[in-house]
Image (spheres, rainbow, N blue to C red):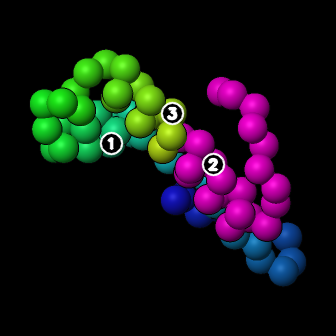
Amino acid sequence: MEQIEEESQPRRVIYLPPASHRLEDYSQQVCHDLGEEFTEPEVIEGFTQFVKVAVRIMARHLNGGTFDNDTE
């Protein structure tokens, strides 16, 4: 997670999920590492969507907010 510090007092850290293309690259690599049965495009796409949702939930939690389920 990337951190951004606001300039207001007290200092607050804002967590942002990694860029979408980085999550896509990560998901593709994980599926590749798991083996041939996980390299189907549907499997990679499903896992990528799961990872994107998971990191958005984590960022929202770390920022003290609620989860926003709007799609990108």
Q: Is residue 20 visible?
A: no
Secondary structure of the residue carrying tag 3 is helix
Which residue is identified by label 1?
A: 26
Judge whether 67 appears above or below 24 on screen. below
Q: Quadrant of residue 13?
A: bottom right
Q: Position of residue 48 (x, y in %)?
A: 43, 34
Q: Which stretch appears magenta?
A: 52-72
Q: Residues within 10 Å of mark 2 (few under 14, many from 20)?
A: some
Amino acid type, residue under disc 1 in the picture: Tyr
Which residue is identified by label 3?
A: 49
Judge whether 68 appears above or below 55 on screen. above
Judge whether 66 appears above or below 45 on screen. below
Q: How far separated are the C-alphas under marks 1 and 3?
A: 12 Å
In this rendering, would 46 be left or right of 40? right
Which residue is identified by label 2?
A: 56
Are dots 2 and 3 in contact, CB under 8 Å? Answer: no
Q: Nearer the viewer, residue 62 or 14?
A: 62
Nearest to viewer (mark 2 / mark 3): 3
Q: Nearer the viewer, residue 39 or 9?
A: 39
Residue shown at 85%/70% (left/top)? 8
Q: Position of residue 27 (x, y in %)?
A: 34, 39
Judge whether 3 appears above or below 28 on screen. below
